[in-house]
Image (spheres, coloured by chain):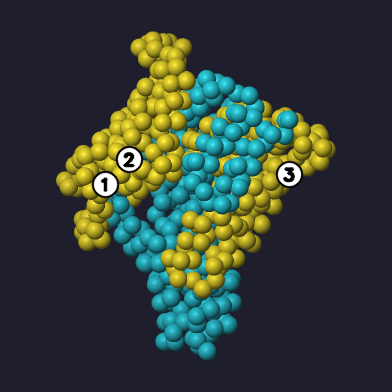
Chain colours: A cyan, B yellow
Amino acid sequence: MEILKLLGILIVVVGFILKLDSILIIMVAAIVTALVSGIDVVTFLQTLGSSFVSNRSMCTFIIVLVLTGTLERNGLKQAAADLMAKFKNASAGLIIGIYGIIRLIFGAFNISVGGAASFIRPIVMPMAQAIVEKDGHPIAEEYLEQLKGMSSAMDNVAWFFGQVLFVGTSGMLLVQSTLADLGYQVELIDLASVQIPVALIATACAIVYYFLKDKKLAKKYAGGAK
Amino acid sequence: MTNPIEYFMSAEITMSDKLLEIMYFVIGLIAIYVAIRNLNDKSNDKRYGTFAFWFLLGLMFVIGKWIPPMYTGILMVLMVLSPILKQVKAGSEPSPSVEEMTKNYKKIGFKVFIPAVSIGAFALIAALFTTISPLFGMGVGVVVGIILLMIFSKDNKPSVFLNDGRRMLDIVGPLSMLPTLLAALGAVFTTAGVGDVISGIVSNIIPEGNVAIGIIVYAVGMALFTMVMGNAFAAITVMTVGIGAPFVLAHGADPVIIGSLALTCGYCGTLCTPMAANFNIVPVAVLEMKDDYGVIKNQVVIAGIMLVVQIIMMIVLS
């Protein structure tokens, strides 16, 4: 039964949906696939071993983390926050856009300065809220909710499309090794350069979209909470 | 099995590959350092499991290439045992206080951005101007960044970097091995011929030889599969082997454009799914939002636009 070979995929899908332990799911899927396809133990272990050796590039993040931790200790986040604060006269929507650009640029250098807990909550949201409340009225609840949603969305869009610009990001290493297994040799720099227009379009779309949405909200809730 | 001495003496192996091997050796030593620090960390109640995980990973980096693949495979199976049995835990390396970070920032200022961008800058320089792998460039960038930080502040001693590195690795933990393990799963799928089975099924549905339709199915499939699983990494191996290769690449489409964009088509799926909880649900909690889907709702439009843009790029450019 050829179709039984797909059992491994089913295990991965069901396992991820049920949020079971990811490492366990992957190992079970690998073992089940080997069993139903008649792969013997020696070949199975050899496949795992050779795959590890040819995919060691995916673990190069380990060497990067030696620098990242100390960068944080030396005030990287504080510097980024200070950079943002230089734009305090913009509109709330523009603040979100500027944050997106900063996030994108850092992402392209494989540095995660951002995220909901470490950047949006302590830095972006207070700035955006202060701008809206400049006229003396407290912000409308629904407006605040939308600003939170847009900031987080900007964070994700800029980070996803920014980090693929980094030559050697783990996603592209996986693409490279998947293609190599299939007999196609591709270079990391080429994979990254394809993404330049994509990143620019994605970030530009997001900035314009959130800017306009904020403008509409600002008009709707002018004069503060009703 | 390869003999390391012969490997490094051989004229047939490129300088780039030899340099990468040295870097992998260093990575192995870092993992072993993390292992030993955790072993000696009496406050970590899971220190033996944590030690085993990082030590085996380090060992695979140090000797993995030079022993028969079967033994490396055995080491891998042993390595994943501790996380599966929930025996890996972050140790007690203290994170820097806000006061310390602010004080350091006051001292160093915006210069802190220079070592931050050096990693990416050196990777790019290696890719553009040398025949050496950008991954080794990344390693050089790390060393340059470390030196710069040491120049900026006398407090940045070598031990500070090692301990901060250990803290970061403790934080990312075994889940950081997910891409590596998914690649191994992909290799097992390939050996088993899973791709042939999928393409056999799909060929009954989509006409063979029409690259444009193949691209649309591949791209949309990446997004949907990622939405279901919450993870584009898991989707890319299965979808590329099953659909990308037989229905798109086999007909002469450019693997660089197709492969690269397929990943970001998957990311469009990530933007639309509560399965990617880290990105879409955790912020809802962190920011105390009322609508559980408040983040996703702000991303759906962008994801839709980008999926269309990328499909057009794939069809036009390749």
Circle nearer the N terminus (2, 3): 2
- The residue under the point 43% across, 14% down is B2
- The residue under the point 32% across, 32% down is B55
Label 2 residue SS: helix
Identify residue for label 1: B44
Identify residue for label 2: B50
Identify residue for label 3: B217
The residue carrying pointer 2 sits among few (fewer than 14), some (14 to 19) or many (20 or more) residues within 10 Å by Cα, namely many
Q: Report the amino acid beneath label 1.
A: Asn
- The residue under the point 51% across, 61% down is B281
Image-quadrant location for residue B301: bottom right
From the viewer's perspective, is the residue at label 3 or at label 1 nearer? 1
Discs 2 and 3 carry the same chain letter: yes
Q: Residue A84's x, y, as percent?
A: 39, 63
Label 3 residue SS: helix
**Mark 2 chain:** B
Circle nearer the N terminus (3, 1): 1
**Mark 3 chain:** B
Number of on-image labels: 3
**Mark 1 chain:** B
